[in-house]
Image (cartoon, rainbow, N blue to C red):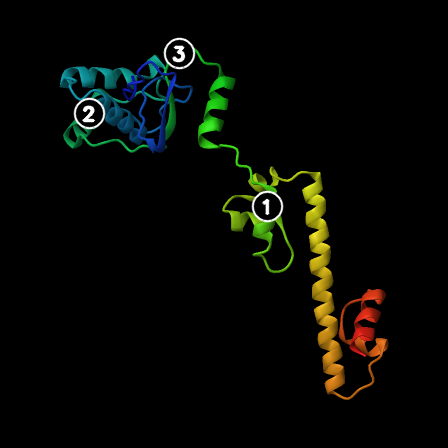
Amino acid sequence: METPISFRGQPYMYYPEGKDYYTLYRGTRKINTIQELEYVGEKLLWLNPEIEWEVFVYHMKQVSDRSNGHIIRTYSEKKVEYICNEVWQKNKKPYCRRKRKVIFNPSKMLSVEEKRKIVQKLIHPKIRFESNEIWDACRMIDGKLTMKKIAEVLGCSAPTLKKSFDDDMIAMLKYKNVLIKKKKEKELINSAISQIKKEGRSLTMREVKKRVPIRDYHLLKTCVLESL
């Protein structure tokens, strides 16, 4: 007993926004509380709006009998009838714990693996970006380039973005980060050199090294020589 679906001969139905789906097929988990038993009653009534009172009560008593294997303890008939009356009077739409986006046709024989592939294709489609899209996104980022920053620009997750990177692109990303780091260090060194000149001090490598946390001798020397 479950929410009726018109499959129209298809192996499954796809609902992008999700669909409230109720089922009363027995699972491995047993009913543990009065609230859970009441929820079963709500689903039974919702899925069978034309059910008669006597039939409704009969099935609820069957479910609430421990010997039938659905529940961890047996409740008295009086208690079950009280629950039935509460559910019958309210006759409300049951709470849906989780909407279903893909509902498979039980009359179609599909393996678990086939179903998994269908769900993956519909709900988690593979997203691939062209290299030019990725590098364009990089131009919009200040500072070090990371998968997270690039993914935010492209509107996806870092793991999804990483699938669009091959070894050459990863190497290029690392190279770009080296250039970005060098540029930032050069700006920092030039700023220190400018400050030294304003203070009227002698421009020496020693003086520059005191003011910046950079120990790239070649870069320091290049910046000093360019400023002379």
- Determine whether 174 is above or below 114 in the image: below
Of label 2 and label 3, which has the lower sequence position? Answer: 2
Of label 1 and label 2, which has the lower sequence position? Answer: 2
Image spot of residue 147 (x, y percent) = 61, 47
Residue at image coords 25%, 24%: 41
Give the side of residue 82 with respect to residue 160, left or right.
Answer: left
Which mark identifies residue 160? none
Question: Which of labels 1 and 2 is toward the front?
Answer: 1
Find residue 87 and report its image quarter: top left
Which mark identifies residue 108? 3
Measured in 3D between alpha carbons, the distance from the residue under mark 2 to the one under mark 3, in whole angstroms, is 36 Å
Residue identifier under label 1: 132
Q: Please report contact status of discs 1 and 2: CB closer than 8 Å, yes or no.
A: no
| Disc 1 residue crowd, few under 14, some 14–19, many 20+, Cα 10 Å | few
Q: Is residue 149 visible?
A: no
Q: Type of residue at label 2?
A: Cys
Of label 3 and label 1, which has the lower sequence position? Answer: 3
Residue identifier under label 2: 84
Q: Type of residue at label 3?
A: Lys
Question: Which of labels 2 and 3 is toward the front?
Answer: 3
Identify the element where label 1 is drawn.
helix
Question: Which of labels 3 and 1 is toward the front?
Answer: 1
Q: Pick the residue in front: 55 or 22.
A: 22
Measured in 3D between alpha carbons, the distance from the residue under mark 3 to the one under mark 1, in whole angstroms, is 44 Å
Quadrant containing the N terminus is top left
Find residue 217 and report its image quarter: bottom right
